[in-house]
Amino acid sequence: MQKLASNTQREIEVTPDDLPLHCPTPSMLLWNSHPRVFLPIEDTGEALCPYCGTHYVLKGGAVAGHH
């Protein structure tokens, strides 16, 4: 069983398997706490949700060769 993450966690590490990234994620307790927004994380390796301020970090950094 997957453990659900709290929506108060302010930094979350994601993997390439989690792409395309959106917030809130399905693993969050309050997955409907704000409108779903897709976050561009591939180029820089990090993204900030404009609604809740959660900072996402891509494990391994930016995706090489992404356009």
Image: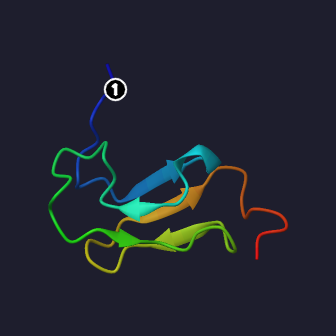
| Left or right position of 38 against 4 | right
| Left or right position of 60 against 10 | right
| Left or right position of 47 against 31 | right
x 71%, y 59%: residue: 61
x 51%, y 71%: residue: 47
- Is 21 above or below relative to 29? below
Q: Residue furthest bottom?
A: 50
Camera-side residue: 52 or 36?
A: 36
The quarter holding residue 65 reads bottom right
Picture coordinates of residue 40, whole percent (x, y): 55, 74
Q: Residue furthest right?
A: 65
The quarter holding residue 10 reads bottom left
Residue identified by numbered label 1: 2
Q: Quadrant of the N terminus?
A: top left
Q: Quadrant of the C terminus?
A: bottom right
Circle 1 sits in a helix, a strand or a loop, which is it? Answer: loop
Q: The disc labelled 1 sits on which kind of residue? A: Gln
The quarter holding residue 36 reads bottom left
What kind of colouring is applied to the model shown?
rainbow
x 59%, y 44%: residue: 17
Picture coordinates of residue 25, whole percent (x, y): 34, 53
Picture coordinates of residue 15, whole percent (x, y): 60, 47
User: Within 10 angstroms of label 1, few (less than 14), some, or many (20 or more) residues?
Assistant: few
- Is 50 above or below relative to 36? below
